Image: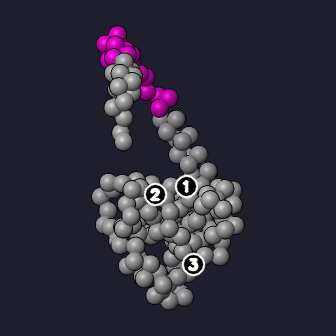
Amino acid sequence: MDGNIPYSKINDIIKDSYAFIGMGTTVGEAAGIGLPSLVAIVDEKENTYGLLGRLPENIVGEPGEDLPLFRYEEAIEMLIQLSEEDYKKERALSLKKASFFSIETVGEKFIAGFNAGKSHSIKITALSNLIYLLSKIQVKYFIKKEYRHK
């Protein structure tokens, strides 16, 4: 095995775990099966934002959030020392947070945002169109010159 796991098999592989460490959709998936899940931070090797169930909405591992950081060792040690009752509470918090990412919740928010946007009109002026075109030219120039983030 090369270390890659098919996304469709993640829940089958982690279902019997005590906890999960990850980011993005996988941390939401793990929380959705009741695993207390530490949120990894992109490009961060030593720290986590902590347990997903205790974090504000929309925090799934983006760097630069204004949140306290916890060393992985300390966060894992805290999880290991939980009583059975406290562990069940963490599982419940994980499930509750995962429901925030459910298709029903996201769909409702999308529809509400779409409906709110229908009442607003956007005026595109010649100047805003020119600025847009110039920004596209500038982006193409930087890509061609290989000024990409490395």
Q: Residue at x 35, y 21 (%)?
A: 141
Label 2: state its secondary structure: loop
Q: Position of residue 22 (x, y in %)?
A: 50, 63
> In what quadrant of the picture does the C terminus appear?
top left
The residues tagged by marks 1 and 3 sit, at their Cα atoms, a distance apart of: 19 Å
The residues tagged by marks 3 and 2 sit, at their Cα atoms, a distance apart of: 19 Å
- Tag 2–tag 1 contact (CB < 8 Å): yes
Provide the residue designation for mark 2.
Answer: 60
- Residue 16 appears in the figure: yes
Magenta-highlighted residues:
117-134
Q: Mark 1 is on which residue type?
A: Thr
| Label disc, if present, on residue 18 of the rendered structure | 3
Label 1: state its secondary structure: helix
Q: Position of residue 29 (x, y in %)?
A: 59, 61
> Is 132 a magenta residue?
yes
Say which label, 3 or 2, has the lower sequence index. Answer: 3
Q: Mark 3 is on which residue type?
A: Tyr
Provide the residue designation for mark 1.
Answer: 25
Q: Mark 2 is on which residue type?
A: Val
Pointer 3 local density, CA inside 10 Å: few below 14, some 14–19, many at least 20: some
Q: Residue at x 42, y 82 (%)?
A: 78
